[in-house]
Amino acid sequence: MRRCELIRVLGGIVAGLRPRRLAVVAIAVFALLPIEVSDAGWLPDLFKTSSKHAKSPKRAKSARQSTRPAKLARHRAQPKHRATRLAALGPVALPPSVLKPAAARCDPSTFRIVLDVGHTAESEGAISARNVTEFAFNLRLARLIEERLKAEGFAETRLLLTEGRARPSLFKRVAAANNLHADLLLSIHHDSVPNKMLEEWEFEGKKSHFSDRFSGYSVFVSRDNPEFKTSLLFAELVAREMKAQGLQYAEQYSQAIMGRYQHPLLNKETGVYSYDELIVLRKTSMPSVLLEAGSIINRDEELKMDSPERRNIISSGVASAVKEFCEPRWALLGPL
């Protein structure tokens, strides 16, 4: 469809809209158009079309006839390929109900996301049903996410590997992330269950533990993080990407059976929880999210988490979430 035809169609659509909603539609149109738009004078005409005090058809016709020669003269005097940048519009005041928390416009080549590899070689986290350490799962997935993000143009992606025992290493990784002046932090983990839920079995001649009771991913944020709203925004994007890939979130964290591991569920549709006391989320100065990619204590899900297919699904989902986080246009509009 040529631009002039598109303009006429849009004019017909918005003719009956109230002014407040019209402003939102106009912003949406500009967001979807290329950065440079030729003959951008159609926007004022669009607003005039929907005015409550529009002229009657008869008067409008005579007005057009009287002004047409002058308009033609001005049009001919102007360059053929006039370009107007979106910045020329200046700030636009949108209704509070329309605005959403949004990341600032970012340049992927300079945007720095830190991928925190959960746990350390000295403190390896959970042990899977087949006696593989969580740290090994975390490192392998984090490296693939790093590779995927760099391939998407996020050249400043940093893999954060920390040494030492459990609690001291948490403060080390927080300090390292803050010193890197990161724009975003994603901590990579794999899930287990409280010890009281574990059952014994034998794998390859070695005693091990499992729990097939729960499975799924989960996403955590801390309400004490100084960038909580932005953290929650990114958490929602990650969780929605996981769900879009057909993955289910772990529902047990909202259940009393989890005891001290129970956490408030912030979004029952996507599986975003709050974990306010977690140091890596609470003490970092940038928006921070923790992803439990799946359960490695569940025997069936451990096999899936060990497969290249599942790792590709998760790394692609994270990369898509980061790209959407950095794209400002999507956040301009709420429900109309």
Image: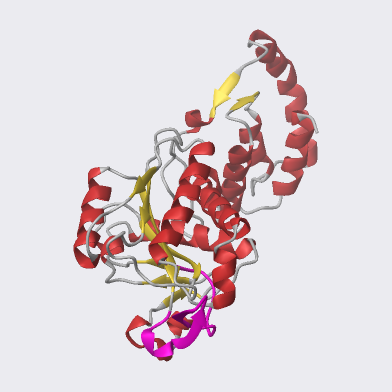
What scheme was used to colour the molecule? secondary structure
| Residue 192: image location, x then y, percent | 43, 76
| Residue under the image location 21 percent in, 52 percent down | 175
Position of residue 75 relative to residue 148, above or below, is above
The image quadrant of residue 278 is: bottom left
Asked if residue 217 is among those painted magenta in the image, a careful observer would answer yes
| Residue under the image location 76 percent in, 36 percent down | 6
| Residue 15: image location, x then y, percent | 71, 47
| Residue under the image location 49 percent in, 28 percent down | 88
The answer to whether 281 appears left or right of 253 in the picture is left
Query: Which part of the image, by quadrant, shows the N terminus?
Result: top right
Q: Nearer the viewer, residue 275 or 196?
A: 196
The answer to whether 19 appears left or right of 179 in the picture is right
The image quadrant of residue 138 is: bottom left
Which residues fall within the magenta stretch?
Answer: 193-219
Query: Which part of the image, by quadrant, shows the C terminus?
Result: bottom right
